[in-house]
Image: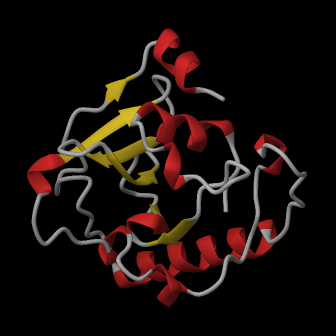
Amino acid sequence: MCYCKDCQAFARYLGSAELLEESGGTDIYQTLPSKVTFETGQEHLACLRLSPKGLLRWYASCCDTPLGNTLSSPRVRMVGVLTKCISDPEALGPVQAMVNTSGASGEPVEETGRRQVIFAFLKRQIGAMLRRDHQTPFFDTSGALVVTPKVLTKEERQAATP
């Protein structure tokens, strides 16, 4: 669960604040991009950045539904998928970490699980590198983004930031 202001701004900018939990948390499942597939609707895949060098934040342009986040390089094999966009989020198991809790609203939230998340991330990275797992729906085979990201203006970002 991420409570950072950027995750909150992403949801708010797309008009999807209802995807945030009551303290502003975004439930994110970190996995490898090769585990993400789009059976239909790939033509609606869109991307935005809250700043020129910010995370790549993916969404469905047809309905402005936030989908997930990646870094700007396909060499870092990670995607944080918003669990509210998964048909059966219960199958993923319980939340294992609460991070960036200084951005939480209302009752204070205790930060937990950061080390476990980092360890799991590194384990997935090493495994993917050893398996030469390069598949991703977000970058083409040359490493270029499949869509050009929209970069928010300072005004757009300020309007979306809680």
Q: From what the image shows, is residue 77 above or below residue 101?
A: below
Quadrant where the C terminus is found in the figure: top right
Asked if 134 appears above or below 54 in the picture, the reply is below
Residue 93: x %, y % from top left:
59, 87
Image location (x, y in percent) of residue 127: 49, 83
Q: Residue furthest top?
A: 155
Q: Compared with residue 83, is residue 103 higher up or lower down, i.e. above or below? A: above
Front residue (pair 44, 30): 44
Residue 131 vs residue 135, the one in the foreground = 135
Write down the quadrant of residue 74 in the picture.
bottom left
Taking depth in this image into account, of 137 and 132 the one nearest to the observer is 137
Residue 99's x, y, as percent?
Answer: 76, 57
The N terminus sits in image quarter: bottom right
Q: Is residue 100 visible?
A: yes
Residue plotted at (76% across, 64% down): 98
Q: Where does residue 128 sit, x and y in percent of width and height?
A: 42, 78
Residue 133 seen from this side? no
35 left or right of 26 in image: left
Image point 66% across, 54% down: which residue? Answer: 25
Which residue corresponds to the image point at 13% horizontal and 57% vertical from the top-left? 42
Q: Quadrant of residue 117?
A: bottom right
Q: Residue at x 77, y 49 (%)?
A: 100
